[in-house]
Amino acid sequence: MKLLALILLLQSTYVLSAPLPTLTKGMDRPECALLHGKFLYVSNMSGPGNARDNVGWINKLDRNGKMIQEKWVSSLHAPKGMKIWKDTLYVTDIDSVVSVDLKTSSVTRHPVPGAILLNDIALDGEGNLYVSDTFGSKIYFVNFESGKNQIEVFATLSDAPNGLYLEGTKLYVAGYGKSKADGTGMEDGPKGGLSVIDVKTKEVTSLVPELGRNDGLAMLPNGQLLLTLKGEEAIHWIDVKENKIIGTLKGATSLAVLTDVADIDFDAKTKILYVPNTRTHDVQLIQLK
């Protein structure tokens, strides 16, 4: 078993602490963990990430990982990134954004014309969604509030967008590399990087280039950004002011096991990091302090 290494500079206060449970019940290729209120929502693709097979679902748990309702929402294809606005959960599902009523769990599917593989979602304070299309190398601007059906291309990027995180007017984008021109997948190279888009001007700035197959993003209260690397068993701590990696969590021990990490979330109150491992069908709860 690989050793787990966590190397952080002195300005970071986050280090690994006590081991926490690994969530396996009801998990099958989990892609995104989302905290909201008292609950933890986990999207499960089950089948391939681009298959329209109706075998995907979302689990509803409490923040300690106790299952409240397995397959709270089912018959999805390959659900990935999620965000919640008011009483609605939004989740990407290949070429659609699906809205789920939190009270009734009723589902409405919103096709996104031209989308190939929708992935992550970022949300602003007015209910606007920014949705990445990894195979299509685009980010869409979407709003379904009050009967709206506003869908438009926000940005087209050479580094295919995967994970998104919005902080004020800064939209952080985890690049996945170069997508194939025919939209069927990814080229062998180059590696994806971390960039930021000003949502007012749409100016794109590269922060840390050529990192790998970058996936999920989460922000710590101290302003450091967490970036997961798909297939590389790693989470980078990134200083977005200095534009550099200041630490990396990689591998496995009794405190944490990273395999194929995807879209993470962080509880600022308890300092618990929720990490879906797609390949090993589990969600790791990692205590930081």
Image (cartoon, rainbow, N blue to C red):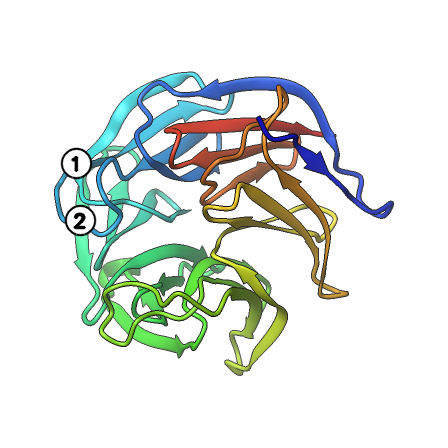
Does 43 appear above or below 143? above
Front in this rendered view, residue 130 or 13: 13
Residue located 32% across and 66% down the image:
142
Q: Residue furthest right?
A: 10
Instruction: Inspect this view and state whether residue 38 appears.
Output: no
Q: Callout 2: 10 Å neighbours few (<14), some, many (20+)?
A: some
The residue carrying mark 2 is 51
- Horizontal side of residue 156 vs 73, given as left or right: right
Residue 127 point in image, percent of width and height: 40, 58
3D distance between C-alphas at marks 1 and 2: 9 Å
Residue located 70% across and 52% down the image:
224
Q: Nearer the viewer, mark 1 or mark 2?
A: 2
- Horizontal side of residue 258 vs 224, given as left or right: left
- Horizontal side of residue 132 vs 168, given as left or right: left
SS class of the residue under badge 2? loop
Residue located 60% across and 28% down the image:
286
**Amino acid at pointer 2:** Ala
Instruction: Inspect this view and state whether residue 118 appears.
Output: yes
Label ID, residue 226? none
Label ID, residue 55? 1
Residue located 32% across and 29% down the image:
59
Assign the N terminus to one quadrant of the image.
Answer: top right
Front in this rendered view, residue 65 or 234: 234
Does 104 appear above or below 23? below
**Amino acid at pointer 1:** Val
Q: Callout 1: 10 Å neighbours few (<14), some, many (20+)?
A: some
Residue 201 point in image, percent of width and height: 53, 83
Does 81 appear above or below 143? above
Image marks 1 and 2: residues in contact by CB distance under 8 Å: yes
